[in-house]
């Protein structure tokens, strides 16, 4: 009797050992890209987070040399986003290139990102379309003996006297 129970437990343990827990997980496979890097730039150790709606837990991944990363989704929710967090050097990313929605991939239990995650290593230059002139006021030199405040406090102010 005990011999049959031991055999049953061993067969059950053997069956459980053969089940791969990663086969049940939903995996996100994607890449990040650098917009201003040269061809041989290593995209390793860039941190990417995955956040799903209704779950407080974040899933984190580090990229490989080619910028690819794999991470298990923290839940089976369909509303998840991936976000580039940073790397070993300062990264610059626009809001639309920093975050991407996670969508179903081609393989079973495989997910990918809907828009590319990209960044730059150099600070982007801002385009000055409507340049406004300096707001510096005129400061006329007044003798300190007069005891007046600096002229920049009241010279630009021209009172409009009402017409009766």
Image: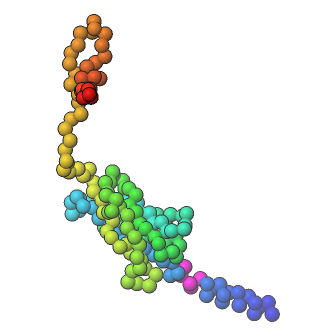
Q: Left of 58 or right of it: where is 147?
A: left
Rendering coords of residue 116 (x, y %): 31, 68
Quadrant location of residue 117?
bottom left
Identity of the residue drawn at 21% across and 60% down: 38
Farthest residue in the front direction?
164
Identify which residue, 44 or 14, lies in the foreground.
Answer: 44
Q: Left of 12 or right of it: where is 130?
A: left
Farthest residue in the top direction?
145
Asked whether residue 65 is in view, the answer is no
Rendering coords of residue 6 (x, y %): 73, 88
The mark total stands at 0
Identity of the residue drawn at 71% across and 90% down: 8
Q: Left of 73 or right of it: where is 10?
A: right
Over which residues does the magenta segment extend? 17-22
Identify which residue, 80 or 24, lies in the foreground.
Answer: 80
Asked whether residue 4 is in view, the answer is yes
Quadrant showing the N terminus: bottom right
The image shows residue 35, relative to residue 21, as above or below, that is: above
Farthest residue in the right direction?
1
Q: How is the image coloured?
A: rainbow
Rendering coords of residue 54 (x, y %): 54, 68
Q: Examine the structure image and report whether residue 67 is included in the region drawn in magenta.
A: no
SS assignment for the magenta stretch, majority: helix
Quadrant showing the C terminus: top left
Identify which residue, 15 or 95, lies in the foreground.
Answer: 95
Rendering coords of residue 41 (x, y %): 26, 60
Quadrant location of residue 15?
bottom right
Identify which residue, 45 or 82, lies in the foreground.
Answer: 82
Identity of the residue drawn at 23% across and 13% down: 142
């Amino acid at each position: 009797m005990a011999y049959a129970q031991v055999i049953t437990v061993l067969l059950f343990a053997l069956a459980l050992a053969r089940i791969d827990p990663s086969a049940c997980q939903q995996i996100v496979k994607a890449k990040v890209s650098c917009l201003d890097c040269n061809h041989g730039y290593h995209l390793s150790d860039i941190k990417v987070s995955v956040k799903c709606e209704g779950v407080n837990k974040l899933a984190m991944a580090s990229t490989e040399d080619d910028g690819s990363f794999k991470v298990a989704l923290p839940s089976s929710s369909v509303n998840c986003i991936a976000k580039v967090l940073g790397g070993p050097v300062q990264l610059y990313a626009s809001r639309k290139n920093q975050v991407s929605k996670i969508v179903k991939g081609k393989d079973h239990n495989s997910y990918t990102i809907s828009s590319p995650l990209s960044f730059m290593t150099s600070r982007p230059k801002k385009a000055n379309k409507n340049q406004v002139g300096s707001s510096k006021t005129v400061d006329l030199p007044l003798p300190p003996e007069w005891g007046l405040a600096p002229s920049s406090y009241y010279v630009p102010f021209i009172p409009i006297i009402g017409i009766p």
